Image (cartoon, grey):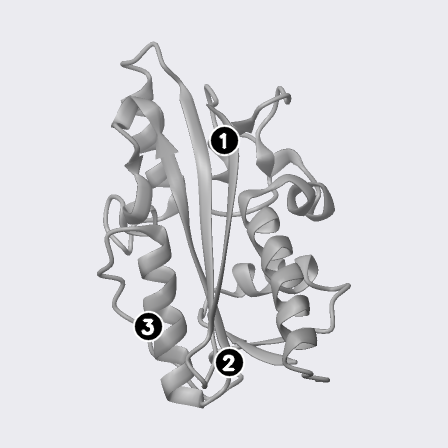
Amino acid sequence: MRIVLASNNRDKLREVREILADSDIEVISQSEAGCRFEAEENGTTFRENARIKARAALEATGLPAVADDSGLEVNAMGGGPGIYSARYGGAETGYDIKCRMILDKVSKSDDRGARFVCAVVCVFPNGDELCADGVINGSIGLVPEGDGGFGYDPIFVPEGLDHSIACLTDEEKNAMSHRGAAFREFAEKLKNYMAKHDIKE
């Protein structure tokens, strides 16, 4: 089955394709489907934002569309930046600066707890919808480390590790990440959906 990923983020497209590599799902980007717009994410939850993006891509292409919304929730910031993770400090602000801003906030607290959260929504032309979620718990490190991943990965230390998720290989990260968990759950739900509706491709 061919599905549009409602995103123009190359890193996210690569990551999702790697996660779904063993499935029968062909993921194409919005730009590959002829769309270059960015849907306005004005929802109040990760799932609402994912749904907004997926529906916009479906309406523009006529193809089934999947979107995720994910972010970093930091205890010392009352769960922030949360759904505003990508826009924290300004949409044009680089993640090296965003990471330093969060490190500064957490340095004033005794609680370094944090989690990455991901919500996935897939919508179909007939109005059907599939949803999946993933979470990875951990803490905010003392300093940025690692050259892998993207976004806030260099400052996030998963539970059970003593280094950031940016120190992992792509394969290691996908096996434990919030996005990996959410898209693996989605892939299983889509497989069942295709079988139920006798969809071959």
Spatial CA distance of label 3 from label 2 is 17 Å
Task: Say the numbered circle drawn on residue 64.
Answer: 2
In-front residue for pair 126/17 = 126
Local SS, label 3? loop
Contact check, label 1 and label 2, Cβ < 8 Å: no
Q: Pick the quarter of the image with the N terminus.
A: bottom right
Snapshot quadrant of residue 194: bottom right
Q: Amino acid at mark 2?
A: Pro
Local SS, label 2? loop
Q: Residues within 10 Å of mark 3 (few under 14, many from 20)?
A: few
Q: Is residue 142 above or below residue 8?
A: above
Q: Amino acid at mark 1?
A: Phe
The residue under the point 32% across, 16% down is: 107
Q: Residues within 10 Å of mark 1 (few under 14, many from 20)?
A: many
In-front residue for pair 134/87 = 134
| Left or right of 151 in this view: 78 | left
Q: Is residue 141 above or below residue 66?
A: above
Q: Residues within 10 Å of mark 2 (few under 14, many from 20)?
A: many
